[in-house]
Image (cartoon, coloured by chain):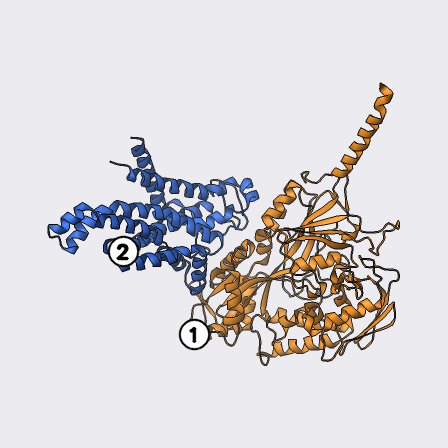
Amino acid sequence: MWPSLRPAILLLAVNFAASSHAQAPAELHFCLHGEPKTFNPLLVDDEASENIRYLTGGVLIRVNRQTQALEPGLAESWRVSPDGRQITFQLRKGIYFSDGSRFSSEDVAYTMRLLMDPQTHSATGDAFRSGSGTVVVKTPSPYIAVVTFPAPVAGMERLFDQVAILSAKSPKKEQSVLGPYYVSEYKAGSYVLLRRNPNYWRHDAQGRQLPYIDTVRLDIQRNRDIEMMRFRRGELQLVNRVDAQQFDELKKENPAAARNAGTGLDGEELWFNQAASSTLPDFKKKWFQSTDFRRAVSLAINREDLARVVFAGYATPAFGPVSPSNQFWFNAKLPAPKHDPKAALALIAGAGFQLQNGTLKDSMGNRVEFTLITNSGNAAREKMATMIQQDLSDIGISVKVVTLDFPSLIERITRTFDYDACLLGLVNTDLDPNSQMTVWLSSGENHQWNPNQQTPATAWEAEIDQLMREETSLANEKLRKAKFDRVQEIVAEQQPFIYLVNKNALSAVSAQVIGASPVALNPQTFWNIDTLRLDPTQQIGSKQ
Amino acid sequence: MIQRVFRGVSWSILAIVFACTLFAEGFTHYPYARQFRELPNAAPSTIHLLGTDDLGRDLFARVVYGTRVSLLLAPAAALLATAIAAVLGGLAGLRGGRLESLILACADLLMSLPLLFVLIALRAFLPLGISPLLSVVATFVTLGLLGWPSSLRVVCAASRNLRQSDHMLLARATGYSNTQLLFRQVIPNLRPIFLAQFWISIPLFILTEATLSMLGLGVMEPLPSWGNLLRGCEDFGAMSANPWRLVPLLLLVITVICFQLILHSSEEPA
């Protein structure tokens, strides 16, 4: 009897092993915060599509999100000409797209032609447009590609981090990829399923082909509260951009899961409406155009309190347009932000303002009061506005806080200019200041305090215009940095934007994920997706 | 008997709540807007009876003043909505014909619009420079001006029945003028309907204001209202850590129940 049972016991043992293997997490789960608008990497202009591009696209040069340095991707090496107009790539050999077609310089040429074609309307392509004329791509050999631009392109190498190479020959076109994953399934409004690219070119130190994780499931989930709830239940393994309060709670529950990558790139700021076409009364325009007024407001705001109370300490007081986490472009010589209501009153007194019975009045006797608008539904911003309201009341300024739905707010700050001051945040995805050209040029539409100027309204705006144009035309990074440092100094002196805080890059990482090392840059938690592993001893659905 | 007890208890609770809000200054030690930034999310203590909110503001003071705002303005808005419903609904029901069709069509049109979106759109058109108090009055007036159609249909149906009733026919036959008909027949007969609609509207408007504030579009900071106090309950994690923050919700629930019990008992046959 016993011998006859042996095969059955063996079979059971095999089944048990197989079932325990099946229970090991085979998929990495996390969320996209919106529907991807496109799977064409050249047409990306939203966060969800950008994440898909990052996970599926192969690029010639990659910005290492941790060191912020450039690393070879599909190009083994590259060389930029001294005039900053030409870049020569030496490509890796023996690389194949996910559908099996061979990668060569023809694919680079094909991608660049499509990217720079005005008919493509590519936001990524726009970043390369430095002057009129066409972009020429030469392919002297299957492994050398030479791209020549009509004019110097500042920070050219970094821009290639956004260019996912398409296959010139594959009938699948953008579905054929060179990145670690390819899109396997997509159910609108529900999920995107990515599978491991069997031809991915990268290998680990032991020679094993990357990525380690076979499939990645991206659930489309707009609601951050639900996302965190699902993470706590063990249904998700990564969460980017966690809200400070939720991070604080998670840290108490599960300290190992709460990851703080330090100061992030995103900032919060307020500005006064200085638009010439605004319908504000002249005396208000005069206040808002006064540098001393803006500097006094800046001095009266207690940024330390904002960081501590609103962001539970997970933010850093800000004083300039560049976050300290942007290692190269941050100007460390800028003075640290101060909170000094007495100095604010002294400064504003010099500009003709007087404090009378706790109320600040201008030289004409007008009571200094203004409305601060912000978008409704953003609890942190509403709290900041309420705290600024109290801070400014200490120097006699009366602030009314008004929350508006986002379309109404955008209408006011971009079209009607019917507002006094606005509190909003800037989401930075690019380290290079060139991505902010429309903010800094006085003719730019995102030059929020006074957009679309025909000629610069002030001498300092004219100087910023000149510095930014010079900086863009330079190929030398050090010279560019010197120019942009000066821009940061002018902005700190003139305070057209009153920078408040830089939020920390907070994320949540499950114990199931091995190798995660969240960073300040996007995509915070999965920037090293190809080297992430899942712990086979942990099961999907287990509590974090 | 039980109905009477419920009614008495409800009236007593509402009276206490109203008294507390009317004489808020006597109960609270701190201004509702003052931020004790060293004490955010503090637990209840002898200094701060209900603790503090996430900006360090005294929660007791905010609840008392917030109750004043919501509890005084919601009945005012309900009165406005009921008055409009009474005039238009009464006119439609008593006159009948094309006028009735026209008024009912207008009511249907207004009912077909999503109230919340209309309120958000109207809120966006308000001038930015108005004071928080004016903004809250504007919010409730808007609620009153838009919240009458459902009451109108009820009033209209009751008026129509009244118009066709025997005692109205008798009153007309005995030579009552229109004014006499209005004051001696119509208003006394429709009074319970008006009262019912008024009581129904109060909690409805309180909840609508709360919804608007939950969306950040209600009463402007730093003025408290039940709505913006309830925004503090959005974060379930923070709630479980600071359960005393549920007091505004508790107060809202109790008040709405009291209004419903009073309404229910007033509908009972004497």
* B49 or B190, nearer to the observer: B190
- The tint of chain B in the picture is blue
Q: Is residue A4 visible?
A: yes
Residue where numbered disc 2 is placed: B92
Q: Is residue B50 visible?
A: no
Left/right of residue A338 with respect to residue B269 in the rendered view: right
Of the 4 image quadrants, the one containing the N terminus of chain A is: top right
Q: Residues within 10 Å of mark 2 (few under 14, many from 20)?
A: many
Left/right of residue A73 with respect to residue B99 in the rendered view: right
Residue A542 location in percent, x, y?
68, 38
The amino acid at mark 2 is Ala
Left/right of residue A259 with respect to residue B138 in the rendered view: right
Q: Residues within 10 Å of mark 1 (few under 14, many from 20)?
A: few
Instruction: Tell me the residue at 43%/46% (across/down).
Output: B63
The circle on residue A364 is: 1
* A340 or A432, nearer to the observer: A432
Farthest residue in the top direction? A1
